[in-house]
Amino acid sequence: MGMIDIRHLQISFDGVPILRDVNLTVEKGRTLVILGTSGTGKSVLLKNIIGLIAADSGSIRIGGEEIIGMDPEDLYKLRRRMGYLFQGAALYDWMSVRGNLEFPLRRRELLDEGEIIARVTEQLRLVGLEDAIDKMPSQLSGGMRKRIGLARALITRPEIMLYDEPTTGLDPITGRDISHLIQHLQEQHTLTSIAVTHDIACARIIADRVAILDKGVICFEGTLDDMSGSTDTFVKRFIAAA
């Protein structure tokens, strides 16, 4: 059993199947990248894993704990072990960078003022944006917003990270830089992670294993080398179009 185990997961919206019999395992300290075109259910899968959407059937175990049907209080405690990088970074526009990073720490009320300042400073150093601490999100470029979003997701020191399209909306150079930063932080913190993306270049940098989702079905799972040699029609088309 891995750190994340998904078995026979199924979900539909208004009778339309979104995920169909999805089975995936992520070992502790490893990164699984789920590739697929837009609208194929990748983000829905992440929201199932964190408990924001309820599946119709199946099982999701995090560290051996079943989250489907879990008591809301227990689910909240489990979420505290997880970090989530949203597509658009989802920074609070009315808060400075400092405020955005302090918010999850103050909400938990676990640290004193000196510890909060030290944690914020450390995270900004890790993402290379110490000088942005008093900027507002509107003053940041897309790449800077992603970096701050990543810093905020990691500031509570989660065991598990979920990345929703981490390079979407970025130019290729910035996307590559963000991918390398994710890889570096993954290694530094020994995180167990799932990233969903359509960006094969990102996958090549951060993935230990990849899975490809097509119309709600996992049509491939394996290494990047395995993927390159796949005979599946959709996999071949996806690689050719990348």
Image (cartoon, grey):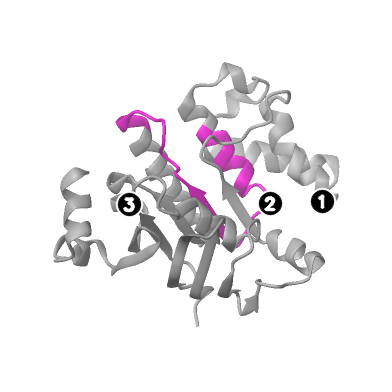
For marks 3 and 2 on the same chain, the one whose residue lies earlier in the sequence: 2
The residue to which callout 1 is attached is 108
Compute the Cα span from label 2 to label 1. 9 Å
Residue 164 point in image, percent of width and height? 49, 47
Q: Residue at x 68, y 25 (%)?
A: 93
* Depicted 215 relative to depicted 142: above or below: below
| Residue 212, quarter of picture | bottom left
The residue to which callout 3 is attached is 203
The amino acid sitting under disc 1 is Arg
Q: Secondary structure at mark 2?
A: loop
Instruction: Give the camera-side residue of 189 and 89.
Output: 89
Residue 178 point in image, percent of width and height? 42, 39
Q: Secondary structure at mark 1?
A: helix
The residue positioned farthest toward the bottom in the image shown: 1
Compute the Cα span from label 3 to label 2. 25 Å
Instruction: Determine whether label 3 and label 1 are within 8 Å by CB.
Output: no
- Few, some or many C-alpha atoms within 10 Å of disc 1 (few <14, some 14-19, many ≥20)? few
**Segment tinted magenta in the rendering:** 146-174
Instruction: Give the camera-side residue of 198 and 152.
Output: 198
- Nearer the observer: mark 3 or 2; the answer is 3
The residue to which callout 2 is attached is 156
| Residue 25, quarter of picture | bottom left
For marks 2 and 1 on the same chain, the one whose residue lies earlier in the sequence: 1
Compute the Cα span from label 3 to label 1. 33 Å
Residue 182 sits inside the magenta stretch: no
